[in-house]
Amino acid sequence: MTTRGFQGRARSTDGRVPPGQFVTDDFPVLTAGPTEFVDTSEWELTVTDGMVTSTFDWDGLHELPMETITSDIHCVTHWSKFDTTWRGVPIEALFDAAGVGDFDYALVSSYGGYTTNLPVTDLVDRDAMVAVEFDGASLEAEHGGPARLLVPHLYLWKSAKWLSGIRLGDDEDQGFWEAAGYHNYGDPWSEQRYTSD
Amino acid sequence: MIDRTPVRQRLAWREAIILASVTESASARTLVLGIDGWDDHRAGQHLDVRLTAPDGYQATRSYSLSSAPGEAPQTTVERVADGEVSPFLVDEIDLGESIEVRGPIGGYFVWEPSDAPVVLIGGGSGLAPLRSIWRAAADHPHPVVIAASARSVDRLLFGDELQALDAIVHVTRETDSNYRTGRIDRSDLDHVLAQANPHGDTTDPVVFVCGPTDFVEHIATLLREAEVQPGAMRLERFG
């Protein structure tokens, strides 16, 4: 349905903007709860598959191989940001170091109680990482520092801030937004915003 | 952890006719919408709005509903400088014309009737979903206590309603004898939290905070200092 009188901005024609998104140079903050302030001296990440459990402190995380990636990111609240640069530990390397087994699903948890769910394949076969730097500087608390999950190919609510745990299993348990009516998978290119999409 | 209720409605895009409009401030306008097949919403929820240009280009944004459940659905839009959608909705679209919407959306920043007192703290256009809540909670047995903030008097939304509800109202970038000056501070919060629980014997209040990110971060920090539990806060950040 054409909206009478609406012209809109200059079109982006390079295919980088998923449907229903607009590009911003800002880095908006979207979080359900208050910002968590976790000191690196207290920060821990626990990875478990129910049989094997490994916990990494800040130094332990930094003993793992790190990579730098540049990616576009997409938030379900309709903004996208191009060419963001992140440094962190690829999830595949984290799981190798943790010694956890092969499972289909992950439930990711945060300091403050936030959770989100996603298939393990989206963590290990793509550019997902435990990110500790954004654009060359330590990750600020409001953006999920000291360490957040980054899954750049899915809507950003999957990229849990203040990462505290990853639990692997055979079944997919729903996380916070997924149980509150948001899509279980969250692919921006298929515009999977809400449960019914 | 925080309560959440699934969105059950199938979220199809629907035509919404602009039935009426209210100029709320120098920069904000309320649009009353006639939506075919609209299901009633819950206080605090939002809509997605979609505009389509003649060549098929579409722009989509989320806007809070400022009407209470049971009232005609309306959204209150603040003009964003150099924005694409908000200037069109605030300055250009006329009564009788149509946009597309889908919703209602949101299972987190939602008020449901309960025994808990309600504290609402809004900055700028963050007052829009809070208006939905204070109207829905008008018959609530426990008090609804409000603190509001705007950059200037001419940017304040719902000033008459806020005055009638005895809200604490701050303007941050000018001085006006009818309002408090500067940011909402800890003493304001202590005051509203005490008002919400005057005898210290009721359930802890649920605190809804909505506004620009800096505002919400500032208020959330003060609430933590006041020992409000994170699970008792509902925060919504605009950009």
Image (tube, coloured by chain):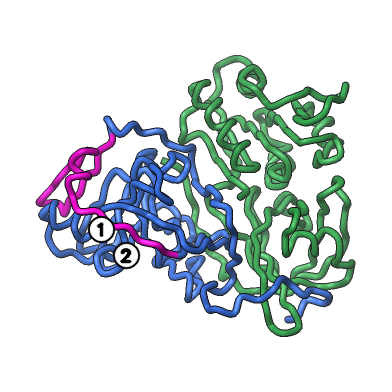
Which span of residues is magenta-colored? A43-71
Image point 38% across, 42% down: which residue? A138
Chain ID at mark 1: A
Residue B215, placed above or below residue B59: above
What percent of the width, then of the height, locates residue B171? 78, 30
The residue shown at (73%, 25%) is B182
Mark closest to the chain's N terminus, 2 or 1: 1
The one of B98 and B110 positioned closer to us in this rendering = B98
Query: What label does residue A90 carry, if any?
Result: 1
Residue for badge 2: A127
Front residue of B148 and B133: B148
Rendered view: A3 above or below A72? below
Looking at the colours in the rendered structure, which chain would you say is drawn in blue? Answer: A
Q: Percent from the top left, x then y, of residue A165? A: 27, 46
Residue at 68% across, 79% down: B57
> Vertically, is B168 above or below B16?
above
Residue A11 spot, x, y in % from top left: 66, 76
CB contact under 8 Å: marks 2 and 1: yes
Chain B: colour as depicted: green
- B47 sits to left or right of B99: left
Quarter occupied by residue B94:
bottom right
- Residue B131 visible in this rendered orientation of the protein: no
Image quadrant occupied by the N terminus of chain A: bottom right
In terms of secondary structure, where does tag 1 sit?
Answer: strand
- Horizontal and vertical percent position of residue A175: 37, 54
Task: Find the residue positioned furthest to the top.
Answer: B199
> Looking at the image, which is closer to me, B6 or A151?
A151
Magenta-drawn stretch contains B187: no
Q: Residue at x 61, y 75 (%)?
A: A12
Which of the 4 image quarters holds residue B35?
Answer: bottom right
**Which element is circle 2 on?**
loop
Q: Nearer the viewer, residue B65 or A81?
A: A81
